Amino acid sequence: MAGIVIQDLTKVYGDSAETRSAPPRAALDGLNLDVSAGELLVVVGPSGSGKTTLLRLVAGLERPTAGRVLLAGRDLTGVPPQARNVALVFQSLALYEHLTVEQNLAFPLNAQTWGGWCSSLVNRSAATSEVRARIVETAQRLRIEHLLDRRPSELSGGEQQRVALGRAIVRQPQALLLDEPLSSLDLPTRRTLRRELKALQQTLGVPTIYVTHDQAEALAIGDRVAVLDRGRLAQVGTPSEIYERPKSRFVAEFFGPMGMNLLEGELTDSGFEISDSEGTLTTIRLPADCWPQDGLMDGRVFVGIRPEDIEVASSHLPDTTCSGILQSIENCGESNYLHLRITPSTTNTRTTNNTAANIIVRQLKPALHVPAPGDTVCLRFRTDRLHWFATDSGMSLVRCDH
Ligand code: ADP
Ligand code: MG
């Protein structure tokens, strides 16, 4: 296939095992991923999860401890970076300050064609005009034609990042690797460049791995999203699959502006009993038809629900799940996020102020009624939107065919 195939890729940094009491943790641990020909795969994960390590291994800047990378069917093991035909763009730009934009764009081409120029001076003008044509085409694609004579110091951050992208694609690489390419830019520029980059990648049709720690960016631009957790693949799927059907608590909590609410407890005949090591807080109403399938749950479980899947009202709602006391409101422009504590039952004997029943609810604006801190409100969960997770492994209790 014309894409990138990553097989059992593992990287353990450092090799002086005798100086350590415990073996070092793998920065990347048995990763398997395919990126098809024109695909934009976003790799997302918290800081230190192995994203940069993955790109450096694909680019050939690090040697894997185990596993291999194939590009267009060719095993890249042992192939030096310059012979891989892979372009890597970093967050921190590496433009040559003393060169103009045009010279910066020409640099990778000159390096590529240098051998040809030396061996045949006759072809030199042909090579030069080809270089010039490529530069103009690339500059047009990135809308930087008017900047060709400027130096990097005379450009805005967004323009500099366009030039860096131009330098990556001017050589017509077989794969594009982008390591947090927009994270040093302001938000409006980031949004614009994100859309442009997606469109550009589609026209180029090259397999692309785009690394970010920003969950919203990952969902916005990825054809598919791969989630890394401490060097391991937590889940890979389309943005909808990742958001709607997270396979684990880790993925569930990582995505969404406020993550996902998780309540720990046990399913009983009367509903879901929220409890922790300090005892029971209250029982909330969750009808049996939304429970995980028999045999998949065992004793204690987490129920998960996103803030947008909870309805809130000041007066009684039919099919109320529970009530809550408003602690604070976070105003996020188009929505308010209400931070609540689920009202404890009257028989609750807890003495400490626990966090077992904190819950966040999204209230879209304009809202008919915005409660004030201290108010008690009714909450209704969309019970077709519940998620269930095992308390020990954190894995989803719903089968993949759900
Ligand atoms: P990310 O890009 O997701 O933030 P990295 O790939 O940079 O993560 O790092 C993954 C892990 O590998 C981290 O624990 C980091 O400290 C470690 N690491 C990265 N580069 C090196 C290195 N050159 N030497 C030793 N450890 C490293
Ligand atoms: Mg990184």
Image (tube, grey):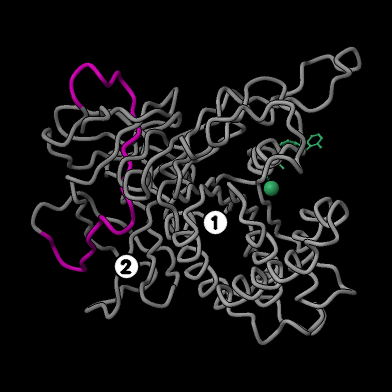
At x 42%, y 78%, the residue is 333
Q: Secondary structure at mark 1?
A: loop
Question: Range of the magenta residues?
Answer: 293-317
Determine which residue is flagged by label 1: 214
Q: Earlier in the sequence, mark 2 or mark 1?
A: 1
At x 37%, y 34%, the residue is 247
89, 297: nearer the viewer? 89
Q: Which mark is residue 288?
A: none
In percent of width and height, residue 124 lies at 80, 64
Identity of the amino acid at label 2? Asp
Identity of the amino acid at label 1? Asp
Q: Is residue 398 above or below residue 166?
A: above
In the picture, measured across the screen, residue 133 lies left or right of residue 121, that is left
Q: Residue furthest bottom?
A: 146
Q: Residue furthest left?
A: 318
Check disc 1: other Cα within 10 Å, few if <14, some if 14-19, many if 20+. Answer: some
Determine which residue is flagged by label 2: 375
Q: Secondary structure at mark 2?
A: loop
